[in-house]
Each structure stands twice: as C-alpha cells, then as structure tokens.
C-alpha cells in the first residue's frame, strides 16, 4: 500500500545465494530461506518511522542499510590487501585446501564481533537488535530442517553470522525472542537492475565494489583470467583512441606474473593486473586508466525479467498508459508531433512530461523553446532499458506514474530555495498536470518572493512564471494564481535593479544583462501594464542616468527602452552622442555600445542618427584601441548576414543611391583610399602575437 517503504535485494549471476538456489534446483535438493521474513522487517521499519515522526518530524525513509560492517575488509587490510574480494579469492577460492581456513574465519568473526560490541549509538543499537532477531530466526529454521531431514544440511550465510549460528542457545529462548514481533502485509516481485547500482554501497545498492571484475572472475577460468582481463583493458583503451600494441599486452601479463610472485600471491590478482596495465598499456599515466576503469570495473549491463513475471506497480501503470496512449517503447529513435488541442495529443504529452519529472527522458522536446505557449509539441522518443530501473527506484514517491511524478516534484520543491528553479519546477508540475505539486510550488514561490531582495534571483523567476501564465492556457488552467505573483516579483526586481547594477565586473555584468533581457521579455509576454510597467521602465531609466551603474547594463537598459518606444530616435541619438563622446572613457563607451547592440546590429540599418553617432565614435578610436575592440565589433555585427553587412557599408559610404554601383575614389585623388589600404596591409601582414589572428 505504501511503496515508499520497500526493500530491494539486488542479485547478479555470481551472487552466492542465487547460485546456491540454482544448484539446489538442478540437483533436486530442497531449499529453505532462513533469514528474517520481509513482512517482519517491513513492519519494523514502519514502526521506527512512526516513532521518529512523533519525536522529530517526518524523517527520510529508513532502509535496512543504514549501518554496514565490512568484516572481510578488516581482515583483508590486515593481510595487506586493498579490498575484501581479492583477499577472499586468494585465501578461499584459490586455496587448494580451504577446509581449515573456514575455522580460522569463524574465529576471526568471533573476535570482530566482540570488538564491535560495546557502547553503541541509536543506529548501531537498532542494527544489533535486528541482527539478533535475524540470527535467532536462522537458528530456529536450521533446527527445524535438521529435524525434518536426515543427512547433512548446508547453510549459506554471511561470514559475520557464523559465530552466532554456532552459539549454544535453546529453541525456547530463540522462539521467545521472536514471539510477538510485528508483521505487515507485503508483496514481492522481480525488477530489472543495473551493474552500476550493484556498486552502490548504500541506498538500494549491493555494495559490490567492482561488479565488472566479479563478473569477469565468474565467467573465465583461472588459466585465461589475466589474459582476458588485459585484452578487455586494451579494447577499452583503443575505443577511447589510445594505441595499445600486442607487445605491450605481453609485457603487461609478464609484469603481473612477476608482481604476484614477489607478493607471494597464489594467482594474479586485481591489484597486479591494474598496476601492470598502468605501467605497460597506459605508459605510467594513471589518468588513462581512470578513463576506462568505470566501464571495466562497474559495467553497463541492465537486467531483464520475463514478460509473465508480475511487475512493480509503477511499471505496470506505465505499461497501461503506454497502451492507452498507443506509444510503444522502442530502442530506435523516432519523432512524434502532438497537437495539444486533441485529447489524444494532450494525454500523450502529459505522460511524457510526467516521465521527464521522474528523470525518465523517454521523450525529449525538440522545440521546447519555440513551442511553449502554443498547441503543438515535437518530441524525439527513444526507450532505454535502464528507464525501468529508474522507475523502480521512484516507487518511494508513489505507485502510479502520476503519483510518483507529483511526489518527486513536491520533494524537489521542498528542497529548492531559489526562485528561478522553483518557478521551473512549478512550470513542470503544471505542464505534467500535477495540481497538488503545482499548488505546493506556488505557495513556496510566494513565501520565497516575500523573503528575498536578490535582483538576480527575482529576474531569473520571471521567464518561467511568464511561461506558466501563457502555457497554462494550452493545459487547461494553472496560471490564475500566478499573474499577481508575476507582477509582484517584477516590481521587486525593478526596485532592486539599480543597486544590483553597480560595481560589476565583466562576467557579472554580462550575467545581469542576460537576465535583464529575459526578464523584460517575460514582462512583455504577460502584458504588464499600469503602475507595475511604469515602475519597471522607470528602473531602466534610472540605470541609464546612474553614473555608478555598470555601462554594459546601462546599454542593455537603453536598448530595452528603445525597443519599447520609450526612447525616441532623436533621444537615443543624443544619448549615444553623450555616451560615446571623446570625454567618456573608452572602456565605458565600449561597454555601453556592447550592451545596447548585443544581438541587434540591424538597428544601425534603419536609424541614421544612431548610425552616425556610432560611426563617429569608431572613427575617433586610435589604431591600437580599434584593434583591441575588433572582437567586440565582431560579436555585435556577427549577427548580420551578408546582404545586411553590404547594406550597412553602402549606407556608410554613400553607395546606396541610385546609379552608384561601387566604391569610387574620393575627390582628393585617392589619398583617403591609400591611407585605408596602408592600414589594411599593416593588419594583414602583422606577425601573430598575444592572441592576434
């Protein structure tokens, strides 16, 4: 009933429990599972969560991996090994007579358990209590099997539990400990998993350090293990563009053998192969090994389950919705065009947006920047098997796609503290038709907006808010509560803007300009009017007149007022005459010029007064300063196509009049042209230096 409380047991082909069950099935040997039943463990988690909620508010869902011990790792490090897997392979799997070793391991576990006992915190004590219950249940089950069957009984368990299973305790004591333990109704199914998640040491992971290495050991023989592993390393390096010769592979295997002999290891281990590969295949560069290590040690395998196996509820709901939407998950990429005015198109779009909210990008919007606010969307669909695993993980948020998407967005909304990302999350909730998450996000937006005066944060919230106000129409609502909030945030941003624009460096100024333009576009989109619009435009006028404001931002503000017809052509020409006058520092003039014309060089084609002011300023620059600002001019005029650049030149040189077909020498007999070509020749023949091209 509550998928947020779940236990996962990851298995791989080489998992000992899985192999034991497979062996028993092949040999017709009865199998009994002796660990504490899941229904007991789930009931205990529910009880602990309830107690924690009463004492300290809602905690994060508790899992059974909150406290982990690595007893084999302790023994491995004591024996000079880097990890428990290599130690176990040498001492147990590669040992020709491992019988006596098991007794030594049992003694070591007994010592480690005695050392671990002692003063424990709440988490450790809870884990100890759970282990005590588990081991009592194991002893009861083992004794029951011994009474039912004659002959030997094999017990597959973790080495940590061996001393407890040998411990002399009466059945009455164990049953008394288990009596009255809470139970809850539960269900079980298979879910696909990935090798990357097997490597996680917490959460839903199995804590296997290197699943790829374990799979390699399981699938190869002792004689070929080293050669095959080195060949895989070579293939991975070649895939990344590195050259690996056969001779280097031979030398790497020889070096690995030598290292194993020097260390008195029974076989070549992971450490020897890694060091040999770094030395011989990576030429001593550890970074090359790191490039391929993740793919080799962890892997990219994704598990599969048969179609007839009952699925996790979230996967079942997705399959139902896929059938309803008539969308088949396919590995090949294909395009999908949706009309949101039809019920089928809106249903498909909603499903895809909800999956995106669950971090399952089955579909990707190819025109999200253009289609938002219209009734058409274009998607690219491509199904990845790992999406099934992500959905299983998101069972903690709900058992249906709608509930899980809403729960995940609500959780992210609670954690987010910035207005911009908060508004994006609210937009995602409205787009995916998740009203509960949207309402919670709007409430958070209102609270955050009332407590912040950060101009950048306020400006960043305006574009997604305006998208909600407009895009909600295509989704059937959701924008009513945000129109007033958008006006409020716009006014707050306007009041904070003059102070935020002072004393900024180049990067901070460009960042503010970018957000300023986006915020103005959002204000125009929601058609802000009245006192709110007057306050916004008044703030832009203040930026132009404020001598302490960064000139880059002042230029951007002037451009926005020019576009809104609040600055006429004559007034704008006078402003440029003042800002680009000889008395203005060149750096300030260039910054104002860049702020005004960023992405809008076409204005010079239509405004003669503006063009004249800019032409006079550029002509007044000395040669070195002009060369220094060439990248700036390139950014400004780079947006003009070839025809527009020719037209601008014609306007400047007076060659656009009827009957004039080309450039003609001036009346002074060509002296101006001679000086012009001298400057060009100097630029073209200059040796590259300090970044000159």
Image: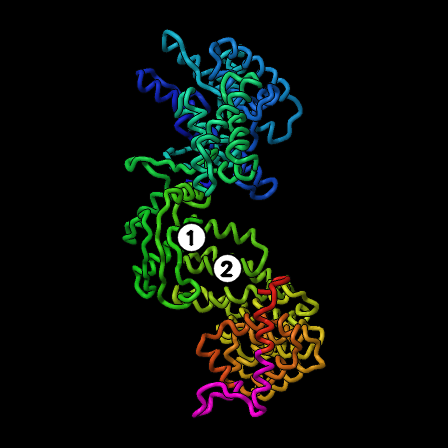
Q: Is residue 320 above or below residue 299?
A: below
Q: Disc number at residue 424? A: 2
Residue at x-position 50% and y-position 82%? 648
Magenta-highlighted stretch: main secondary structure?
Answer: loop
Q: Is residue 263 above or below residue 538?
A: above
Placement of the C terminus among the 4 image quadrants? bottom right
Q: Is residue 650 above or below residue 686?
A: below
Placement of the N terminus among the 4 image quadrants? top left
Residue at x-position 59% and y-position 85%? 672
User: Residues in magenta?
Assistant: 652-677
Residue at x-position 58% and y-position 82%? 674
Q: Disc number at residue 16? A: none
Secondary element at image label 2: helix
Q: CA distance from mark 2 to mark 1?
A: 13 Å
Q: Is residue 663 above or below residue 523?
A: below
559 or 641, nearer to the observer = 641
Residue 374 pos. (x, y %): 38, 68
């Amino acid at each position: 009933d509550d998928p947020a409380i779940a236990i996962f047991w990851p298995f791989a082909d080489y998992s000992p429990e899985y192999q034991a069950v497979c062996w028993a099935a092949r040999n017709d040997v009865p199998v009994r599972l002796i660990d504490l039943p899941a229904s007991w463990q789930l009931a205990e988690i529910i009880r602990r969560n309830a107690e924690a909620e009463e004492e300290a508010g809602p905690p994060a869902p508790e899992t059974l991996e909150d406290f982990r011990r690595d007893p084999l790792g302790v023994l491995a490090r004591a024996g000079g090994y880097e990890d428990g897997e290599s130690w176990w392979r040498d001492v147990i799997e590669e040992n020709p007579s491992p019988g006596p070793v098991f007794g030594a391991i049992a003694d070591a576990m007994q010592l480690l358990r005695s050392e671990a006992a002692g003063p424990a915190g709440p988490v450790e004590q809870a884990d100890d209590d759970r282990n005590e219950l588990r081991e009592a249940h194991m002893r009861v089950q083992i004794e029951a099997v011994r009474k039912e069957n004659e002959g030997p009984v094999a017990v597959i368990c973790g080495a940590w539990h061996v001393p407890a299973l040998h411990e002399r305790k009466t059945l009455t004591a164990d049953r008394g400990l288990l009596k009255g333990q809470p139970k809850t109704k539960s269900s079980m199914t298979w879910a696909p998993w990935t090798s990357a998640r097997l490597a996680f040491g917490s959460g839903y992971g199995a804590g296997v350090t290197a699943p790829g290495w374990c799979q390699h050991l399981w699938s190869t023989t002792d004689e070929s293990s080293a050669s095959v592993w080195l060949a895989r390393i070579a293939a991975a390096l070649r895939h990344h563009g590195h050259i690996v010769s056969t001779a280097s592979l031979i030398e790497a295997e020889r070096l690995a053998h030598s290292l194993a002999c020097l260390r008195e290891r029974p076989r070549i281990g992971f450490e020897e192969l890694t060091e040999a590969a770094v030395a011989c295949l990576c030429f001593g560069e550890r970074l090359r090994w790191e490039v391929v290590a993740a793919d080799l040690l962890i892997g990219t395998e994704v598990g599969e389950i048969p179609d007839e196996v009952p699925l996790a509820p979230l996967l079942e709901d997705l399959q139902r919705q896929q059938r309803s939407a008539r969308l088949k998950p396919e590995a090949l990429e294909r395009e999908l065009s949706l009309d949101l005015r039809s019920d089928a198109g809106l249903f498909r779009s909603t499903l895809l947006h909800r999956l995106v909210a669950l971090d399952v990008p089955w579909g990707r919007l190819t025109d999200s920047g253009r289609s938002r606010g219209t009734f058409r969307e274009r998607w690219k669909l491509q199904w990845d098997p790992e999406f099934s695993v992500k959905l299983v993980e998101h069972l903690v948020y709900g058992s249906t796609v709608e509930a899980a998407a809403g729960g995940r967005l609500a959780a992210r909304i609670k954690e987010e503290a910035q207005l911009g990302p908060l508004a994006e999350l609210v937009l995602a909730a409205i787009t995916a038709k998740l009203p509960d998450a949207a309402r919670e996000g709007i409430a958070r937006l209102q609270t955050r907006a009332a407590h912040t005066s950060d101009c950048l944060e306020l400006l960043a919230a305006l574009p997604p808010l305006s998208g909600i106000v407009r895009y909600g129409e295509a989704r059937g609502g959701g924008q009513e509560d945000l129109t007033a909030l958008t006006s409020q945030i716009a006014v707050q941003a306007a009041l904070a803007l003059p102070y935020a624009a002072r004393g900024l460096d180049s990067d901070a100024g460009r960042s503010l300009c970018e957000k300023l333009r986006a915020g103005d576009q959002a204000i125009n989109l929601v058609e802000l009017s009245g006192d709110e619009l007057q306050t916004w435009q008044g703030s832009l006028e203040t930026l132009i007149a404020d001598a302490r404001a960064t000139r880059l931002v002042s230029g951007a503000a002037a451009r926005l007022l020019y576009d809104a017809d609040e600055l006429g052509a004559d007034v704008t020409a006078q402003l440029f005459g003042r800002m680009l006058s000889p008395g203005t520092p060149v750096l300030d003039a260039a910054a104002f010029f860049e702020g005004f014309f960023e992405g809008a060089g076409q204005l010079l084609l239509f405004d003669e007064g503006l063009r004249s002011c800019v032409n006079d300023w550029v002509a007044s620059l000395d040669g070195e300063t002009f060369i220094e600002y060439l990248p700036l001019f390139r950014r400004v005029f780079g947006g003009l196509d070839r025809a527009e650049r020719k037209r601008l030149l014609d306007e400047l040189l007076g060659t656009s009049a009827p009957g004039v077909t080309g450039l003609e020498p001036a009346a002074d007999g060509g002296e101006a042209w001679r000086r012009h070509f001298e400057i060009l020749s100097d630029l073209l023949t200059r040796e590259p230096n300090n970044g000159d091209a």
